Amino acid sequence: MEAGNKFGAIKRPELAPTYNDNSSSICFMQTDIDYYTGRSPGTHEDVPILRIYGVTEEGHSVMVHVHSFAPYFWAECPQGMDNEFYCEKVKQALNNHPQCKNTVARVTTELKESIMFFTNNGALPYFKIFTYVPKSVSQLRGIVERGISIDGNAFNCQTYESNIPFALRYMIDVGIVGMCWLELPAFQYDLRYDDNVSTAQIEIDINYQNIIVHKPEGEWSKIAPLRVLSFDIECNNNGQNFPTPDKNEIIQIGNVCKIPGTDNVIARNIFTLGGCADIADAKVFSYDKEEDMLMGWKEFVLSVDPDIITGYNILNFDYGYIFKRAEKLKLKKFPFFGRVKNTETKIKDTTFQSKAQGLRESKEVGMDGRIQLDMFQHIQREHKLSHYSLNSVSLTFLKEQKEDVHWTTMKDLQEGSDETRRRIAVYCLKDCYLPLRLLEKLMCIFNYAEMARVTGVPFSYLLTRGQQIKVASQLLRKAQEHNMLIPTQARNEGGEKYEGAFVLEPKKDFYNVPIATLDFASLYPSIMMAHNLCYCTLVPPSILGRLEEEDYITTPSGDHFVKSNLRKGLLPIILEELIDARKRAREEIKRTEDPFMKKVLDGRQLALKISANSVYGFTGAQVGQLPCLQISSSVTAYGRMMIEGTKRTIEEYYSTANGFPHDSQVIYGDTDSVMIKFGLENLEEVMKLGKEAALMVSQQFVKPIRLEFEKAYFPYLLMNKKRYAGLLWTNAEKYDKIDMKGIESVRRDNCALVRETINTCLYKLLIERNVEDAVDFVKGVVSALLQNKIDLSMLVITKALGKKTQAEGKSNKNIYTAKQAHVELSKKMHDRDAATAPGVGDRVAYVMIKGVKGQKAYELAEDPIYALKNDLSIDFDYYLEKQLKLPLSRLFEAILTNPNSLFAGEHTRKRYQPKSTTGALSKFIKITTTCISCKTQIKSGALCQSCEERAPEIYLERILQSNQYEKNFQELWAECQRCQGSVHQEVLCTNRDCPIFYRREKVRKDMCYIKGELEKLALNW
């Protein structure tokens, strides 16, 4: 049915009469903030006006225009210039500068302190330079730092807080944090009626000083009923090439809208081009023209008025496709989806780079007042997985998959009947439903909301910016409380190196006795609090001589910091508040019975934990906003000293000389933990000694540094630095799990065969404690691999394409200089089909195929689907030598006298011999006829003379094989039908992350091969 005016039921609730005038206060939860330039009441020129978007407790949408807040920054004030005369001179000099004429509104002075260094000088005058518009701040910063002339004298100085986004500057100054509740007092605001510029139900003008901010505590920690819309599109194609917006129309758009944390589904519908059969629990809107369908979908989005829009890879695919199609169809009224009327929604390219994630290219969608939460990017950012397809991620977190209809089949389904188009619709709706399920399962809304509240930044910053802004926001707020300013530093590409975390040399072995593990609780935050390490407590060499020795400490790295009796550091204050708040949140979780509030509080305690652990990283990030080598090197130096001191104390005290049955031994220490072998075989006694040792050692440290006993390993396999596995026990009654670090089973750049083999071996060694069983299992895996009995899905390797494949501009730091398998394959895939080829930031899946002598390994990487379809032979020796051998050798090194026996011997003699399918010589290879049974070369027929007399027996064997293959195929087919939700339709799924897909294809090939042999035998017989 045509959409028309069918969306009345999904609109937000009607406004109550209390919203008809300003006689009542209005409370709402702020969701986003931005600004524009326009005329405020009483002004004759354009000024910045902030826009705050939000939602009331009843679910009404709000937009508030905040007036009269002016942008500004700080600059050093030379001695003797802190008066109105020089303030006016500075203003004139800046306004007369050719690069920033008439940009400064006014200049004042205030007494402040710089956060950098303890100088003991007290507050000094600083210029506060107000500008007319925010963009002038960055221009003026450069001019002030380079220098201006006042009365013929050169004047240049350090600027402070001149790189803060204008919206964040406002939030900090008035005490607003992300996702907090704001109150607009009665009679202090003006409602807009006929002059609305937004689609919000309530639109208001207010002076920035009249807004009441509620801290997100107690009753104000609640979450407003946010509307989250998940959508997905399906496109037509010619059956051969991946769809492109300039050629192929959009055939369906699926939508699911609900309020997270509740069962309230607001809308579930599908927009289709052409008719579509009915779908249970979903509305179908069918259209004859794509133009009408797109405009109908726009009307739906504006009617449902989502606060957050989600989906899977919507930023890099769906949005761009929709907007380009609308442009192709000349739909000029289409790209207006934000909450500000007549403001076009635009898409721009963005790049993000970090040490952890490498380079990622993406799109940014400017949709005023609507947060874009792409679950694909969230999963990539927060979780380390081998595959990031929706199917693979859903299987990992939701334990469910979906039918993956390949894009090449869309054309036939679209051109079919209402029933075939219904099949596309069901598939499309599942692609909308799963991201919403993931969003709720991973508690994204609650976790992001609480992170915004804890760090003080808007929700959208958490999705589009890195880690630095979160700590910077907290530091700016705390500096303001203490009348301090933060200098603006130029970002360096790299800085001085400092010695990182300390790791004790491991005593490698397989320990069949309990190993106690002592952990430092929040080690780096505790060190910073205990020793008062901060920017403002750091003593420069010029001041050191003027201080008494008892007033400062000297860190193991040779730096000096004043003690808290002279000045309490801002970083320790922030950390104490975060840790105390986390304790309160965890206690409140225990008290509350409301499951919704439990999720909110759990998100809060997680945000507080992450924030506390991020502070040290902020000081150590050399390419950051405010790096401080003295703080970061002091923290790690204290950490090293404490690990070494702990080792020395434990080994001295728990010894035979002190009456203990064995000399204790610290077998390993890693950053914030030590592993101790007390020599006892009784787990309960070892745990008791571990608790005693933790209390004894903790007494040597400055509070709040604390060593805790939390777990023991029994047995424990220590292979190398940061590489171990053990059976973890937190109580002596029942083990918790197998815990591992740095082992191939948790590394993403190994194939699933390695991970599964390692996991099974660890289970047999640590839980079953059967070495012989583990050895037999490994030999069985090696034998199956060499005989081509391992599923192709188990051999897929994935690696991230973290850099570009060619230099861009002058920078060579983001390109691959050496040839690598996954990089070369991405080039090949780009040549085959640029639209489906992996891009920067994607993980490339590949298998290694058999080549000819002399071929480089990077030339032999191939797309698994391409290898399967083209019957390319797998290089089993590569998987044995380069994938399995090293990790298994490391695993069994401390257990077997000769680990190489796992990879050589009787079990490796029977091998599958594939025909060469690559290289120049493969074109000249002539395939000869061989006997079906013994493979002897023959001129014609199916069997050699020796095997002919066994023809009935061989025929029967092949019949039985054929029956088995058919049975296997039927079982796999039935499994796929159950997954797609119908036993009456053909299976179209091509989910490359599903092992059943590869098994199904392999059995299909085996069936074809055996049928061919049977036909030959029938003719011969």
Image: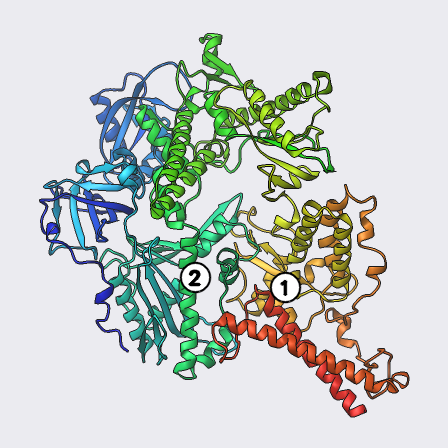
The spot of residue 434 in percent (x, y) is: 43, 61
Specify whether residue 70 is in view: no
Quarter of the picture holding the N terminus: bottom left
The spot of residue 491 in percent (x, y) is: 46, 36
Give the residue displayed 35% in from the left and 64% down from the top: 256
Label 1 neighbour load within 10 Å: few <14, some 14-19, many 20+: many
- Amino acid carrying label 2: it is Leu
Q: In this view, does 780 lie above or below 219?
A: below
- Residue lying furthest right: 946
Q: Which is more toward the observer, 317 or 666? A: 666
Give the residue displayed 61% in from the left and 37% down from the top: 732
Numbered label tally: 2
- Amino acid carrying label 1: it is Ser
Q: Determine whether the residue tagged by mark 2 lies in a helix, strand or loop.
A: helix
**Mark 2 vs mark 1: which is more N-terminal?**
2
Give the residue displayed 52% in from the left and 25% down from the top: 706
Q: Which is more toward the observer, 921 or 714? A: 714
The spot of residue 92 in percent (x, y) is: 23, 30
Q: Quadrant of residue 1012?
A: bottom right
Q: Determine whether the residue tagged by mark 1 lies in a helix, strand or loop.
A: helix
Give the residue displayed 49% in from the left and 26% down from the top: 526
**Residue 793: numbered disc:** 1
Q: In this view, does 876 lie to the left or right of 1000?
A: right
Contact (Cβ within 8 Å) of mark 2 with mark 1: no
